[in-house]
Image (cartoon, rainbow, N blue to C red):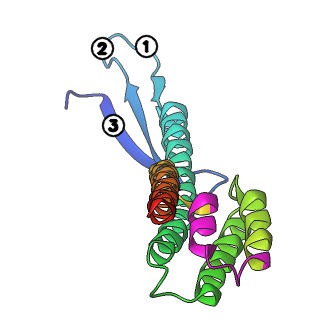
Amino acid sequence: MPKGQALQNDLQVGADNQQAPRTTVTQSSGASGMSGANVDISSRSKDTQNLQVTLSSLKQEVDALKTKRLDMQVDEALANIRTLASRPKLTAPHVHLAAIETLVDIALTTNHKEAALFSKAFSTCKKYEDNEEFCSLVLKLFGSQEDKRIASLVADWAKSRKYESSDKVKEQYKGQGAE
């Protein structure tokens, strides 16, 4: 370092107990007799702004992850209900109701946007617990769009089979009456 030039590094402690480096450069011109000039090079405010932006960004990411996790809990409960409802002969209605009640509890706890709908659907399902078409109702209420479409197609098919079989019975009666 040239004569008459000194470099100091100090640590400056702020009110928030964060430490930031502060650099002070003191330069004096030995021959000219000029007094020393202090130049404070501080990027503390810029660093603070960068840290605040980063912190804000991280908070948003954490909030998004929390929301995603809560939505995933609801999705898992719905998937469980759909799986149970797709196997009507293997699962008793009270098991379906317990799964639906779990969904309602999770949805209410997480403030899910469809919590009220799930709650009303649960109340409706309790009324039809003894109905032999209970699983169809559960799939209609809690199924995905694909589940609902497939259920509708199967219902149409079953209805057409019913009409076909009733036509065959009528033909048999006509055939017996002709003999």
Disc 3 from disc 2: Cα separation: 19 Å
Instruction: Specify the quadrant that holds the N terminus.
Output: top left
Instruction: Specify the quadrant that holds the C terminus.
Output: bottom left
Q: Residues within 10 Å of mark 1 (few under 14, many from 20)?
A: few
Disc 3 from disc 1: Cα separation: 18 Å
Q: Is residue 81 magenta?
A: no
Q: In this view of the protein, which residue sits in the foreground, 95 or 61? A: 95
Mark 3 or mark 2: which is in front? Answer: 3
Q: Which residues are magenta?
A: 127-141
Residue corresponding to mark 1: 34
Q: Residue at x 66, y 82 (%)?
A: 97
146 to 89, vertically: above or below: above
- Residue 7, numbered circle: 3
Q: Residue at x 62, y 85 (%)?
A: 93
Q: Is residue 131 magenta?
A: yes
Does 87 sit left or right of 93 as displayed? left
Q: Amino acid at mark 3?
A: Leu
Mark sitting earlier along the chain (3/2): 3
Q: In this view of the protein, which residue sits in the foreground, 100 or 110? A: 100
Does 7 sit left or right of 110 as displayed? left
Q: Main secondary structure of the magenta part?
A: helix
Q: Residues within 10 Å of mark 3 (few under 14, many from 20)?
A: few
